[in-house]
């Protein structure tokens, strides 16, 4: 990633909405995100992405403050018609009103309160211990091997076990779930069609409904059992609510944590100075984690539908229109972060938007951070050096900012 240093007039010319199709994952393969977003923030911070190929148009927010305001505002915006471009553009999400992320109002609060019980640090303590052990084992094995694809050797193999532990998913089924999951939001390559995503999503839902039926008969301590047996005002959750919310944990918990894990290693392969700061314990693991979250921005955008006319800067978003919030721009906004293009593990303050903000703030943020801290700690103690062996490949996505491959050599710590 580079920081574009262009004269103002040239920068302004680059803030051309027609130059980028944000619905096309290829756009994110072809363009450096900083070169793409910086001109818009400076000269066209709120713009209309015209309809293309039969897909509706939508608003694009690039400034940190505008994005935070939209995340906070669940009165004038709704998530119930989708919260990522793939569903927003369809105008509906089949899980609306049932799955936390695409539910608003009192039902959102009720389900969120219920699920939060399973996400407190106290309840999660055994899960956290397993994350630390597994991360350390996988890093040790990767170091022993020396040259690995970090995605398949390590990143792919951690979060699903966390979710698996949380939900009591049998160990033998977890690999298949990772595979389906990778196909739902991102695709491995441009050659896989959209129907691959859809089929994978259906497979996951089918799998969970089988597991849910089993947990209703034999409840355990896991989150799925909690969802399957919980009541709100004396009423159990509907089957759809249980299935969709379990599904959202697999979805939310797996992909973004994987993306961040490979992002950490990629960043350290490029920024030796920050690697040395980590190694020499010149920064805390906590501040390093926040900077890695900002730097990698695992989820590039989220979005909403406007419920009413909303003025933003020089524009008025009309009721019913789609508004997209680009985390990958907000996290590098010059007005919110000093020296945003510098990867600085000691950065403070660091109020990145990688976990969102407001009523839909990531339910798994604590777990996400646990993954990162465990990874940083194991890398710091087990690895002396990280060397990139080949240019990495990105996941083919306009949503997930992760790697499909990341070939590295890890030298062991003496
Ligand atoms: C929501 C990012 C890990 C479960 C969100 C949102 C973001 C996000 C940005 C807000 C979506 C919106 O406003 O529409 C991330 C990142 C992660 C991560 C970057 C890891 C690095 C996890 C984990 C879990 C999880 C580990 C669960 C095990 C959820 C759920 C929501 C959510 C259930 C919906 C919350 C609501 O709507 O009230 N996540 N997430 N996430 N995340 Fe995460």
Image (tube, rainbow, N blue to C red):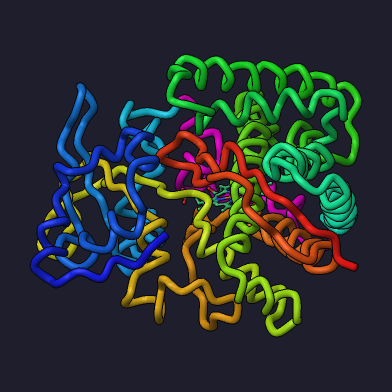
- Tell me the quarter of the picture where residue 22 sits: top left
Q: Is residue 303 visible?
A: yes
- Counting every numbered tag in the picture gives 0
Viewer can see residue 111: no
Residue 397 drawn at (x, y percent): 44, 36
Residue 413's place in the image compared with 231, above or below, is: below
Could you tell me what secondary structure mostly forms the magenta stretch? Answer: helix
Task: Left or right? Give the position of 292 relative to 97.
Answer: right
Image quadrant holding the C terminus, namely bottom right
Quarter of the picture containing the N terminus is: bottom left
* Vertical placement of residue 110 versus 413, above or below: above
Instruction: Write the residue at 32% across / 77% down.
Output: 335
**Is-magenta flag for residue 277?**
no
Q: Position of residue 219 (x, y in %)?
A: 88, 31
| Image spot of residue 321 (x, y percent) | 22, 41
Q: Residue at x 51, y 22 (%)?
A: 197
Task: Indicate left or right for 326 with 50 as reference.
Answer: right
Q: Determine the image quadrant of residue 269.
A: bottom right
Q: Position of residue 398 (x, y in %)?
A: 40, 39
Residue 98 falls within the magenta-colored stretch: yes
Nearer the observer, 81 or 139: 139
- Residue at the spot 70% in from the left edge and 32% down from the top edge: 236
Q: Which residues are magenta?
A: 94-122
């Amino acid at each position: 990633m580079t920081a574009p240093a262009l004269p103002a007039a040239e920068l302004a010319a680059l803030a051309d909405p027609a130059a980028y199709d944000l619905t096309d994952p290829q756009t994110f393969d072809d363009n450096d995100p900083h070169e793409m977003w910086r001109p818009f923030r400076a000269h066209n911070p709120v713009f209309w992405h015209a309809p293309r190929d039969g897909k509706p148009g939508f608003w694009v927010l690039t400034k940190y403050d505008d994005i935070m305001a939209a995340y906070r505002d669940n009165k004038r915006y709704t998530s119930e018609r989708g919260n990522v471009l793939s569903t927003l553009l369809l105008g509906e999400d089949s899980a609306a009103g049932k799955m936390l992320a695409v539910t608003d109002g009192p039902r959102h609060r009720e389900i969120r309160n219920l699920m939060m019980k399973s996400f407190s640090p106290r309840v999660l303590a055994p899960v956290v211990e397993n994350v630390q052990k597994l991360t350390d084992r996988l890093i040790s094995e990767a170091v022993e091997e020396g040259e690995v694809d970090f995605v398949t050797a390590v990143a792919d193999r951690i979060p699903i076990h966390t979710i698996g532990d949380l939900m009591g998913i049998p160990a033998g089924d977890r690999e298949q779930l990772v595979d389906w999951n990778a196909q739902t939001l991102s695709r491995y390559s441009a050659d896989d069609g959209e129907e691959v995503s859809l089929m994978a999503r259906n497979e996951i839902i089918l799998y969970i409904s089988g597991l849910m039926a089993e947990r209703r008969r034999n409840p355990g301590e896991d989150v799925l059992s909690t969802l399957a047996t919980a009541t709100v005002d004396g009423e159990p959750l509907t089957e759809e609510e249980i299935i969709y919310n379990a599904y959202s944990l697999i979805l939310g918990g797996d992909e973004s944590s994987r993306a961040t894990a490979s992002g950490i290693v990629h960043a350290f392969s490029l920024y030796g100075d920050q690697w040395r700061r980590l190694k020499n314990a010149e920064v805390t693991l906590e501040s390093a984690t926040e900077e890695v979250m900002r730097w990698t921005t695992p989820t590039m955008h989220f979005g909403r539908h406007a419920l009413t006319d909303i003025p933003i800067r020089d524009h008025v978003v009309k009721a019913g229109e789609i508004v997209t919030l680009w985390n990958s721009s907000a996290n590098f906004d010059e007005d919110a972060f000093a020296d945003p293009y510098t990867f600085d593990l000691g950065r403070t303050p660091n109020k990145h938007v990688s976990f969102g903000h407001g009523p839909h703030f990531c339910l798994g943020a604590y777990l996400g951070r646990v993954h990162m801290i465990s990874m940083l700690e194991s890398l710091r103690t087990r690895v002396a050096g990280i060397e990139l062996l080949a240019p990495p490949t990105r996941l083919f996505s306009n949503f997930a900012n992760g790697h499909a491959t990341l070939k590295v050599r890890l030298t062991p710590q003496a």
